[in-house]
Image (tube, rainbow, N blue to C red):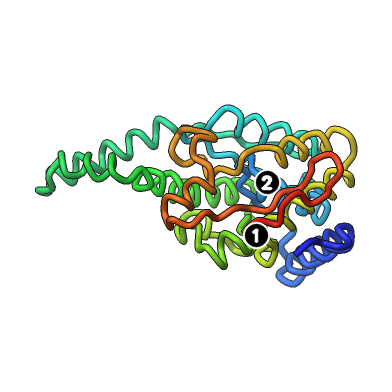
Amino acid sequence: MPVLDISRLIANRVDAIRAFHSEFNVPRAELDVSGGIDSAVMAGLLVKALGPENVTFVHTNINTSSDQSMRAHQLITALGGKLVNGNFTNVYDDIVTIAINSLVTAGYEHEAILERIKRDPTVLGSIRSTLRAPLGRAYNRLTGGGIRHGTGNECEDRFLRFYQKGGDGEVDTNPIAMLSKSEVYQLAFGLGNDFGCDARIEFRKTIDATPTPDLLGTGVAQSDEDELLALTGAPFTYGRVDSVTGAIISIGT
């Protein structure tokens, strides 16, 4: 449902994050930043709650589109943070090659494996997703350790189960888990206003971008809504807001 007072919801989530860190006496946090709307909102909330100096922002590049990477970098810079941008494309390629070769050595048919990959692109997409989780934890430990926050929202995680347990589901908390996608968009608009001109511009870019998990190396050619249609046969849609006014354009399915 539409958020009637965005500033109060932002304050509620910021207070909750601060209270969680205080309860466990952990001053630092880590966040995987994709360049999409959910991680943008979480980045803004964490900066308000903990300060940019206490958050390790990680962008793990595995065949990631340049648009996604650029949005992630520009947003975190506008928020006053430092974005770790590790390109693991070659590592991923080596892992897939070694995995396939070892399966063939064990007696599995090479052509059958390649056909399975061709028939279902999410096979390799899921490998990209599950590689990002341990890398996020590694960066977290290398920078002093902290609470690893997730970016899952209610539409994707609760209703659609559109996530991977060992990938984006492998986190310590999900502070926006109770929010629908349209509510997340509203928070993005509100956070943009809170942080000033540079951040406002970057949040608006992210609001206007096509939602994509970007796990196939094809950028926006793999959109969330198209993939959900292919998986379920049902035309699921997300809510949208106007990036300039914050007005709700569509509630979505």
Q: Position of residue 50 (x, y in %)?
A: 80, 54
Amino acid at circle 2: Ile
Q: Which quadrant of the structure image shows residue 22? A: bottom right
**Residue at position x 60%, y 47% from top?**
32
The answer to whether residue 24 is left or right of residue 58 is right
Q: Which quadrant of the structure image shows residue 207? A: top right
Mark 2 closeness class: few <14, some 14–19, many ≥20 residues within 10 Å: many
The number of discs equals 2
Q: Secondary structure at mark 2?
A: helix
Amino acid at circle 1: Ile
**Residue at position x 64%, y 50% from top?**
31
Q: Secondary structure at mark 1?
A: strand
Q: Position of residue 183 (x, y in %)?
A: 74, 58
Q: Position of residue 221 (x, y in %)?
A: 50, 34
Q: Which mark is residue 37?
A: 2
Q: Which mark is residue 147?
A: 1
Q: Earlier in the sequence, mark 2 or mark 1?
A: 2
Spatial CA span between label 2 and label 1: 21 Å
Q: Quadrant of the C terminus?
A: bottom right
Mark 1 closeness class: few <14, some 14–19, many ≥20 residues within 10 Å: many
The reply to whether the C-beta atoms of the residues labelled 2 and 1 are less than 8 Å apart is no
Q: Position of residue 206 (x, y in %)?
A: 70, 39
Q: Tell me if residue 68 comes above or below residue 136 in the rendering.
A: above
Q: Tell me if residue 76 comes above or below residue 164 in the rendering.
A: above
In this view, the residue in front, 71 or 82, is 71
Q: Quadrant of the N terminus?
A: bottom right
Query: Which label lies toward us, 2 or 1?
Result: 2
**Residue at position x 61%, y 29% from top?**
67
From this viewpoint, which residue is outermost toward the bottom? 23
The answer to whether residue 243 is left or right of residue 95 is right
In this view, the residue in front, 56 or 180, is 180
